[in-house]
Amino acid sequence: MGNDGGSIPDRRDLVKNKPKAEQADKNNQTIAAWFFCALSKRPLQEPVVSCALGKMYNKDAILEYLLDKSAYGDGANICGHIKSLKDVKTLRLTLNPTSDPSSDEAFRHAQFICPLTLKEMSGSLPFVYLTTCGCVFSTAGLKAVSSPSPSSSSSGATPPPADGTTVDSPDVSSNTTEPCPQCAKPFSRSADVRTINPGPEEQEQMREKMIIAAAEAKLAKQASKKRKAATNTVDASDLSSDAPAKRSKTTTDPSIAPVLQPMMNPSISSVARKVTEELAEEEKKRKANMSSAVRSLYGPKDGKKKKETFMTMGTFTRYA
């Protein structure tokens, strides 16, 4: 039982130290990020796409998610910011000739490499892709092929001043573009280069940029709608102001002949007038010779007009 004088326990037997927090295997995390789709958890297969946060997905998995948001249980947490295929970019990857996906050691060699340095895209080196064309390079390879500034390319290296002071190299504007090393499509290093599988801090910065870009696009869309509505209003006012001028022009312009009204034959009009007068005379005589009994059929018995009700309003009622 213990504590009866027969045994004296040590402190280490009574007090348990706090266990160390379990840490995920970094190697497994790296393999999951660079060899598998972030959404379906299946091995990456072309076509491969990437979002604004630098994650890589199989394109068929993204299509399944867009068609059915419940196809993947944690899809909203992983790629909830993807609303359409416009939010992803298809990557132009370079296959690794030494990689064999069918072998047992498929994850020993990366499936893709950098076309400039031939370094494997396994997560040991940072990789980036261009949002303009989707070409993928290692960060070191893209920096190595950086184009020289216009001043240095035209006049060569600038000699140092005679007094020995140093001269800073000219800053390249953020709007300066250069051709892609693989497809020669122009891109900007400050706006069109996106890191693949960035760290937590860089991923938060990329998320903030994504939110700002979405807000700016929404404001631009609203502004374009307002400009379009204002243009339509101005056009409508111009049309309404031009209409009276056109009408006045048609009435005052002597060169335009007026519309002629149809003319009736005088003989026909005289005959019609004569027939109308004869019919009116016969009706007058008939009413004069009408007896009081017959005349009472066409009016109230008391001789006063009866007030119309809701049921007889607007109708002809004969009183017997």
Image: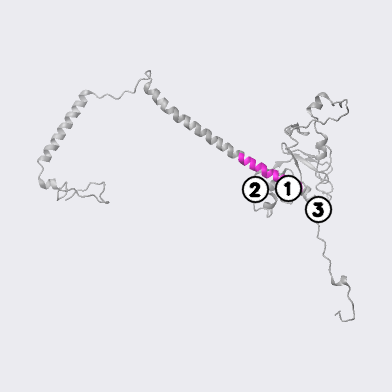
Report helix, strand or loop for mark 1. helix
Q: Label 2 belongs to which residue?
A: 66
Q: Label 3 belongs to which residue?
A: 28
Amino acid on which disc 1 is placed: Glu
Prevailing secondary structure class for the magenta stretch in the rendered image: helix
Mark 3 vs 2: CB contact within 8 A:
no
Of label 1 and label 3, which has the lower sequence position?
3
Query: How packed is label 1: few (under 14 Cα within 10 Å), some, or many (20 or more)?
Result: few
Front of the two marks 1 and 3: 1
| Separation of residues labelled 1 and 3 (CA atoms) | 22 Å
Q: Nearer the viewer, residue 110 or 201?
A: 201
The magenta stretch is: 201-219
Query: How packed is label 3: few (under 14 Cα within 10 Å), some, or many (20 or more)?
Result: few
Asked if the stretch drawn in magenta spans residue 208, the answer is: yes
Q: Label 1 belongs to which residue?
A: 204
Q: Residue at x 16, y 29 (%)?
A: 274
Of label 3 and label 2, which has the lower sequence position?
3
Report helix, strand or loop for mark 3. helix
Amino acid on which disc 3 is placed: Asn
Front of the two marks 2 and 1: 1
Looking at the image, residue 260 lies above or below residue 306: above
Looking at the image, residue 314 lies above or below residue 251: below
Whether residue 285 is visible to the viewer of this picture, yes or no, is: yes
Q: Residue at x 11, y 48 (%)?
A: 293
